[in-house]
């Protein structure tokens, strides 16, 4: 069962209450005149980013000969 705290006490100790919720994971209900007003809960854990290695594994395909030069050797300026 979550703890309860009045809105005036929450206002005075807001950072302490938030730190407590983060540390313990126990939610706290903030009340105003005895009625539930807000719920302070621990945020969800951040999603871990996937590795970029192998991300495009199935995205490309080889078309044609990849070992031969793109142009004939007679067209290379470095060999002239």
Image (tube, rainbow, N blue to C red):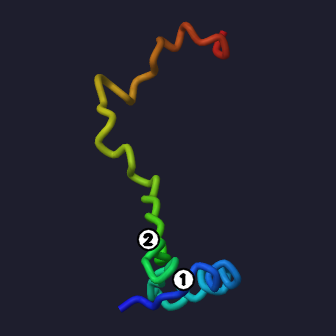
Residue for point 54% across, 83% down: 22
Position above or below: 55 against 16: above
Measured in 3D between alpha carbons, the distance from the residue under mark 2 to the one under mark 1, in whole angstroms, is 10 Å
Front residue of 16/9: it is: 9
Front residue of 71/32: it is: 32
Position above or below: 40 against 1: above
Q: Position of residue 36 (x, y in %)?
A: 43, 77
Q: Position of residue 13 (x, y in %)?
A: 68, 84
Residue for point 66% across, 78% down: 11
Checking the image for residue 22, the label placed there is 1
Which residue position is annotated with label 2?
44
Q: How many neighbours does mark 1 have within 10 angstroms: few (below 14), some (14-19), or many (20 or more)?
A: some
Q: Work out whether mark 2 precedes mark 1 in sequence or the reverse, and give the earlier one.
A: 1
Residue for point 32% across, 37% down: 59
In terms of secondary structure, where does tag 2 sit? loop
The quadrant of the picture occupied by the N terminus is: bottom left
């Amino acid at each position: 069962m979550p703890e309860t705290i009045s809105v005036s006490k929450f206002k005075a100790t807001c950072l302490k209450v938030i730190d407590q919720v983060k540390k313990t994971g126990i939610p706290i209900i903030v009340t105003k005149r005895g009625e539930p007003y807000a719920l302070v809960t621990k945020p969800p854990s951040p999603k871990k980013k996937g590795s970029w290695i192998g991300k495009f594994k199935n995205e490309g395909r080889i078309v044609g000969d990849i070992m031969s030069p793109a142009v004939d050797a007679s067209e290379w300026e470095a060999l002239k």
